Amino acid sequence: MQLEDKFIEVKGAKIHYLEEGSGRPVVLHHGARFNAYTWKEVGTISAIAEVGYRAISIDFPGFGKSEEGNFSSLSEFIGDFIDTMKLEKPILLGASMGGEAVLGYAVDHANKLGGLILVGAVGVSSYESKLKNLDGLPILLIWGRHDTTSPKRNAELIMKYVKTAKFVNVGNQHACYLDDPEGFNSQIKDFLKGL
């Protein structure tokens, strides 16, 4: 399936997403300065489709082409989106703010997920009491070597509770996928191939 621009209504809000490929769904969540197209620009959407998965890159409510909507948190929105799209055991990717939103959803719904890819996720310590819920879930943690926005201790905190989490460094900055898109995408492809 070629890359397509799509819209779906989630709790009355028109939400925009990009979709490519078929197979198990991988839902991509952007950081605060970015939107759904970021994952197209760095080649992550097509990399995921290439290895036999269905890539779904969403604009969070109020970002990109998505309406604001009435959601109490981005984590709640993720759950509503998954339910509206009727996604079975999706793998969730989240960067920075999107990583925190994904983590917030995952600690309460680990049984509904097929895996997690967290990229420089922020706010990890607020979920410390629930991180053990993620143990058993395949998790890839990707951090830039010199990430000053989300220090490495955020990744280490997850690894302390989750034996199934794997840590890799890509690039240098917080948005490490901009430094080394090729290295970033190849880590994701290897992770997905191993699921």
Image (tube, rainbow, N blue to C red):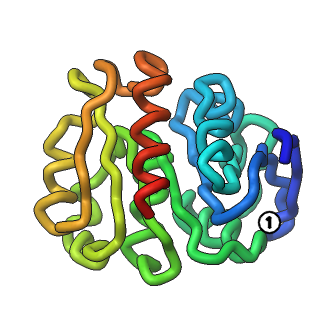
Q: Quadrant of residue 96?
A: top left
Q: Quadrant of residue 175?
A: top left
Please tell me which residue is depicted at 60% across the width and 48% down the height of the picture: 51
Question: Along the horizontal axis of the image, is 117 left or right of 24?
Answer: left
Q: Quadrant of residue 54?
A: bottom right
Please tell me which residue is depicted at 84% across the width and 48% down the height of the picture: 1
Q: Secondary structure at mark 1?
A: strand
Nearer to me, 53 or 173: 53
Q: Label 1: which residue?
A: 10
Question: Along the horizontal axis of the image, is 175 left or right of 162?
Answer: right
Question: Along the horizontal axis of the image, is 6 left or right of 163?
Answer: right
Question: Along the horizontal axis of the image, is 20 left or right of 94?
Answer: right
Asked if residue 69 is positioned above or below residue 47 in the image, the reply reads below
The answer to whether residue 62 of the structure is visible from this angle is yes
For the C terminus, the quadrant is bottom left
Amino acid marked by disc 1: Val
Nearer to me, 10 or 52: 52
Please tell me which residue is depicted at 58% across the width and 67% down the height of the picture: 90
Asked if residue 137 is positioned above or below residue 183 in the image, the reply reads below
The answer to whether residue 97 of the structure is visible from this angle is no
Q: Can you give x and y, in whole percent of width and height, for residue 43 in the image?
A: 62, 28
Please tell me which residue is depicted at 28% across the width and 54% down the height of the picture: 124
Q: Can you give x and y, in whole percent of width and height, for residue 21 in the image?
A: 75, 50
Q: Can you give x and y, in whole percent of width and height, for residue 107 in the image?
A: 37, 72
Q: Can you give x and y, in whole percent of width and height, for residue 48 in the image?
A: 60, 45
